[in-house]
Amino acid sequence: RQTQHGLMVSSLRSMKDMQHSYLIMKIVKRAPYLHLDSTYQATRAYKPLISLESTPQQIIDEWRRAADRLEDKNSDLARRLRDYTYHYEAKTGSNRQEQIDVNNENHPFFDFVDQLWKSLYDEMPKQTPPVVQALLLYADMQEILHTQGWLIIEPGPGDRFDSVLHREVGQEQIPAIEIGRVTKLVRQGYVRYRKGDNPQVRKAWVMVNVR
């Protein structure tokens, strides 16, 4: 049997592999979706740099190596990555050798991820080998969150403002967008739904349209 894409059903990979492929396409290739026929091509050159069972110390070590690789071509980015890694290390305390468990919306792992993305996003068009490796490492961080049940909250321009999932951090006047709707995403949010419990929400920061 074949899919609508002409791909043999037996050749489809697991949902875990599909998720990994999607993260690579979204973060490294800047593509908004993954075509089924592109799954293998997306991942064949990119192997995870950190495992889903990583400890904070292993993650810290990998980001220090990433900063070292960037030193010659982009010393400013390398310095920022080292700073973020240092602050994350300071917050992990004595739990650095235990498998990472992002168990609440205020976990320092989120701050680390947010800081990394803020700096790496501007570097995406350059696509130098050290930048690509840093983006792949960031994709691994997102996969850790996904595996632990955290879903990204990423509203786009024109989306309805949701006070449960979004936090207004500023206002803009954009004629093409309805009043009260989102105009810009400032920081990604995350939500985790667990059976029998209230959702855990790290609100996305957004700008909202006003008159």
Image: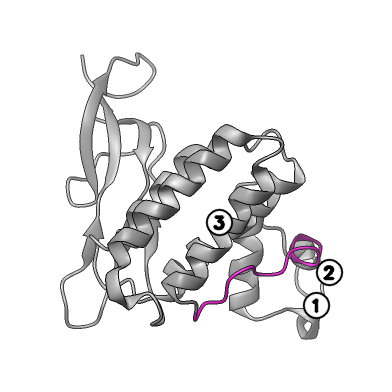
Residue 12 or residue 133, whichever sits in front: 133
- Is disc 2 placed on a helix, strand or loop? loop
Q: CA distance from mark 3 to mark 2?
A: 43 Å
**Residue drawn at x 29%, y 14% as measured from the top left:** 173
* Amino acid type at mark 1: Gln
Residue 152 visible, this angle: yes
Query: Image quadrant for the C terminus?
Result: top left
Q: Earlier in the sequence, mark 3 or mark 2?
A: 2
- Is disc 1 placed on a helix, strand or loop? loop
Q: Are marks 2 and 1 in contact (CB under 8 Å)?
A: yes
Give the residue number, with chain letter if any, for mark 1.
2
Left or right: 91, with 138 as reference point: left
* Amino acid type at mark 3: Arg
Q: Earlier in the sequence, mark 3 or mark 1?
A: 1
* Amino acid type at mark 2: Gly
Give the residue number, with chain letter if any, for mark 2.
6
Q: Residues within 10 Å of mark 2 (few under 14, many from 20)?
A: few
Q: CA distance from mark 2 to mark 1?
A: 5 Å
- Is disc 3 placed on a helix, strand or loop? helix
Q: Quadrant of residue 92?
A: bottom left
**Residue drawn at x 57%, y 63% as measured from the top left:** 62
Tell me the number on the disc at residue 77: none
Q: Are marks 3 and 1 in contact (CB under 8 Å)?
A: no
Give the residue number, with chain letter if any, for mark 3.
64
Q: Residues within 10 Å of mark 1 (few under 14, many from 20)?
A: few
Q: In the image, which residues are magenta? A: 41-53
Q: Is residue 136 above or below residue 72?
A: below
Residue 36 or residue 123, whichever sits in front: 123
**Residue drawn at x 56%, y 33% as measured from the top left:** 76
